[in-house]
Image (cartoon, rainbow, N blue to C red):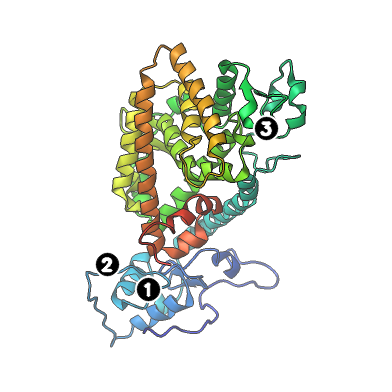
């Protein structure tokens, strides 16, 4: 067992002097960044790299002339908080790969370039923490769906749309004003979903299409104007040089942002808010990723097989460091197939609603109520396709649903794989909403260690 040094003040981090702050990041700032070697809590910059006290001491001891390490495997051992003491050879190689310098052992100083890079990294992590704190604040409102005097706390999310419409007969809705969409009318003899009728399918479709447009992260015309804005070679290499856990965390944040828009979209599907809170959450947990994938087809350029990501269009090579090429290839293939259907924005909106509202989802309390809402959405999609003289698309869309299920199962499988290898990132650094929707389910998959 490798000896771990007790905590000690870091030797080469800046300090406050005379009440002023050095231009270098101080210790408190640096500690927002986990140890670059094992992911444990860092204690400062040691030998040119942000590390914990354990990895700092290990690297110093490794510089002794009598030290020689070897690997009994294939020199590719995983190094994290739990496994860092199992293979000294691979731990040292990771130290060197991350930039820990043998010269720094002697001189203990950072270059201006290293210092500037560190300042930029501290700021990136600070922004990520602020974003995660905002997500944490939004989780309660996103998943618990308060219905009285509700104010959306995130400026990125759509405000309630009910006030945007006015219909004769709205007085019928007053007893349910906080829970019933204005396109729904409750029978005076039955206030449950079974008594709801739609004034006509055009109003149902208009509601869903409006919500789709208002909760889409990017409009079609914006994406079209950017379709030839591609990552250059240096930018691609920057993504590929990220560690597996860094890239997973980055993509988890982007996926969570997309899911938040899907949640707001769901809230304005007629009938969704009348489902029980448990069923709303169950539908989102199992369907939000599928809707994200449907929406991703809007961000896809079939001419060069790229998808809009981080402000530019990216090919599969950008996601290489995720270490799940089969999933990325399958997602790109799905997007390409969706684009081949040439769906209109209205058709995508209704199909997205139908993907989400599915009475076959597990853990539903009232399948009958969900099924009635599902049928109304299905009728709306049928109405749109009939109007567009494209009834034959319905069968093709249901085939896409089966592909979505397999893609989401593969995503969960990869997440379980990642969580086993990078537990610190999965449990502590992923956005709270991502963990709530996906990670807790991945832990229940067969083969998961408890």
Asked if the residues shown at circle 3 and circle 1 are in contact, with their CB atoms under 8 angstroms apart, the answer is no
Pointer 3 local density, CA inside 10 Å: few below 14, some 14–19, many at least 20 = some
328 to 3, vertically: above or below: above
Task: Estimate the x, y position of residue 21 in percent, counting from the top left.
Answer: 64, 66
Pointer 1 local density, CA inside 10 Å: few below 14, some 14–19, many at least 20 = few
Q: Quadrant of the N terminus?
A: bottom left
Mark 3 or mark 2, which is nearer to you?
A: 3
The residue under label 3 is 160
Task: Estimate the x, y position of residue 256 in percent, counting from the top left.
Answer: 51, 46
Of the two numbered discs 3 and 1 on the same chain, state the one appearing first in sequence: 1
Question: How far apart, in angstroms, are the residues tagged by discs 3 and 1?
Answer: 49 Å
At 51% from the left and 54% from the top, the residue drawn is 435
Pointer 2 local density, CA inside 10 Å: few below 14, some 14–19, many at least 20 = few
Please indicate whether residue 335 sits to the left or right of residue 357 in the image: left
| Residue nearest the observer in this picture, 309 or 56 | 309
At 53% from the left and 82% from the top, the residue drawn is 8
């Amino acid at each position: 067992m490798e000896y771990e040094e007790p905590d000690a003040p870091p030797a080469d981090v800046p300090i406050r002097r005379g009440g002023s702050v050095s231009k270098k990041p101080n210790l408190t700032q640096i500690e927002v960044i986990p140890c670059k070697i094992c992911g444990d809590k860092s204690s400062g910059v040691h030998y040119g790299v942000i590390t914990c006290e354990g990895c700092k001491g290990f690297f110093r001891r490794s510089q002794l002339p009598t030290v020689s390490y070897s690997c009994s495997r294939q020199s590719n051992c995983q190094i994290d908080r739990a496994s860092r003491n199992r293979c000294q050879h691979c731990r040292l190689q990771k130290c060197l790969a991350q930039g820990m310098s043998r010269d720094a052992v002697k001189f203990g100083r950072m270059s201006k370039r290293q210092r500037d890079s560190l300042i930029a990294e501290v700021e990136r992590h600070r922004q990520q923490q602020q974003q995660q704190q905002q997500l944490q604040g939004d989780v309660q409102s996103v998943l618990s769906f308060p219905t009285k005097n509700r104010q959306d706390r995130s400026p990125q999310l759509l405000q309630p749309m009910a006030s945007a419409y006015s219909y004769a007969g709205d007085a019928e809705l007053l007893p349910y004003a906080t829970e019933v969409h204005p396109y729904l009318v409750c029978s005076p003899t039955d206030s449950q979903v079974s008594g709801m009728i739609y004034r006509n399918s055009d109003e149902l479709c208009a509601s869903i299409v409006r919500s789709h447009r208002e909760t889409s992260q990017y409009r079609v015309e914006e994406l079209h104007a950017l379709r030839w804005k591609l990552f250059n070679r240096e930018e691609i290499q920057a993504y590929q040089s990220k560690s597996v856990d860094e890239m997973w965390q980055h993509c988890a944040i982007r996926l969570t942002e997309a899911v938040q828009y899907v949640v707001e979209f769901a809230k304005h599907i007629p009938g969704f808010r009348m489902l029980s809170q448990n069923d709303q959450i169950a539908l989102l947990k199992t369907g939000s990723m599928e809707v994200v994938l449907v929406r991703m087809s809007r961000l896809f350029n079939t001419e060069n097989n790229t998808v809009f990501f981080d402000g530019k269009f990216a090919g599969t090579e950008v996601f290489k460091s995720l270490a799940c090429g089969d999933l990325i290839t399958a997602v790109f293939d799905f997007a390409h197939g969706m684009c081949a259907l040439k769906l209109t924005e209205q058709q995508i909106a209704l199909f997205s609603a139908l993907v989400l509202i599915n009475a076959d989802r597990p853990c539903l309390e009232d399948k009958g109520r969900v099924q009635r809402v599902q049928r109304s959405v299905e009728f709306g999609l049928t109405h749109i396709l009939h109007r567009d003289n494209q009834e034959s698309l319905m069968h093709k869309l249901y085939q896409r649903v089966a592909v979505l299920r397999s893609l989401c199962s593969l995503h969960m499988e990869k997440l379980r794989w990642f969580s086993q290898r990078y537990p610190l990132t999965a449990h502590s650094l992923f956005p709270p909403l991502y963990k709530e929707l996906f990670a807790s389910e991945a832990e229940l998959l067969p083969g998961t260690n408890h």
